[in-house]
Amino acid sequence: MAPELGFDRKELESLTGQAAKLAQKARHRMDVTLKPDGSLVTTADEEVERFLRKQLERLVPGASVWGEEYGFDPITDGGTWLVDPIDGTSNFRFGQPLWGVTVAFMRDGRLLAGSVVLPDLGWSFCASLGGGATLNGRPLDPVKKGPIQKFELLGHADDGIEAFSFLPGKRRHLGAFVAEAMFVATGGYRAMTCTKACLYDAAGSLVVLRELGAEFRCEDGSFFDESLWLRPVKMAPFAVVPPEAWPVSLP
């Protein structure tokens, strides 16, 4: 039985879509600066996160928010919103379409709902725990079971593509977790890896992928537990793989 969310997931998808449109409009009037780690941040990122924080606090009063630009609020019993206002900021800044807005809701250590919108591609994903996953309102097919073939595509959300070097497949790197993950969700990629993300980068996508039957594995083969990473640090490396693909048989 699907857990009670306390809100309509369609409203979450609508808010994420509004935020994505706001980002597209802000793209033409934004300022760009560098963070201490050398990554880009734009005034569009900040504007979108401010919008989402206000709307999400209304959607679930009393829930906290952890967003990339404005930080980690104290966790509350009401749950936590995980927000990356623009995932793939460099792609966004330089006019590439592989970026998106991602929002997820977590409570009691479980990711309950997520929404991911890649507006330049016209993609709007939404999922809830036990409630399935959709693309533009239509149910998505489950991830295909079985081993990863050497000719299939394997995405790397970060530049550390040496991680999970034992996984078969042709390697690709798009520069945005949401792009890599939603390519898995739509079948364009067979699997993906992640080595440098915070939970807010990945949370919305993880809800979608879990509803499609994907598995999340650490490098030693153990199952990845996102509940350990509701804190302002980078997550341990993990891979998103099809069911029945592990253990990996090397070619």
Image (cartoon, rainbow, N blue to C red):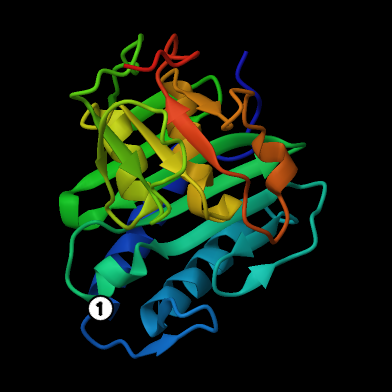
Q: In the image, residue 230 lies at what x, y percent?
A: 71, 50
Q: Amino acid at mark 1?
A: Arg
- Direction from residue 17 to residue 194 in the image, left or right: right
Which quarter of the figure is the N terminus placed in? Answer: top right
| Quadrant of residue 172 within the rendered picture | top left
Q: Residue at x 52, y 78 (%)?
A: 37
Front residue of this view, candidates 35 and 101: 35
Q: Residue at x 31, y 87 (%)?
A: 30
Crowding at dot 1, Cα within 10 Å, few <14 / some 14-19 / many 20+, comes out as: some
Q: In the image, residue 74 lies at what x, y percent?
A: 80, 62
Above or below: residue 238 compared with residue 141: below
Above or below: residue 199 compared with residue 36: above
Q: In the image, residue 169 lies at what x, y percent?
A: 27, 28
The kind of secondary structure element at disc 1 is loop
**Quick check: can you spot residue 136?**
no
Q: Residue at x 40, y 13 (%)?
A: 249
Front residue of this view, candidates 169 and 100: 169
Residue assigned mark 1: 27
Q: In the image, residue 85 lies at what x, y percent?
A: 44, 64
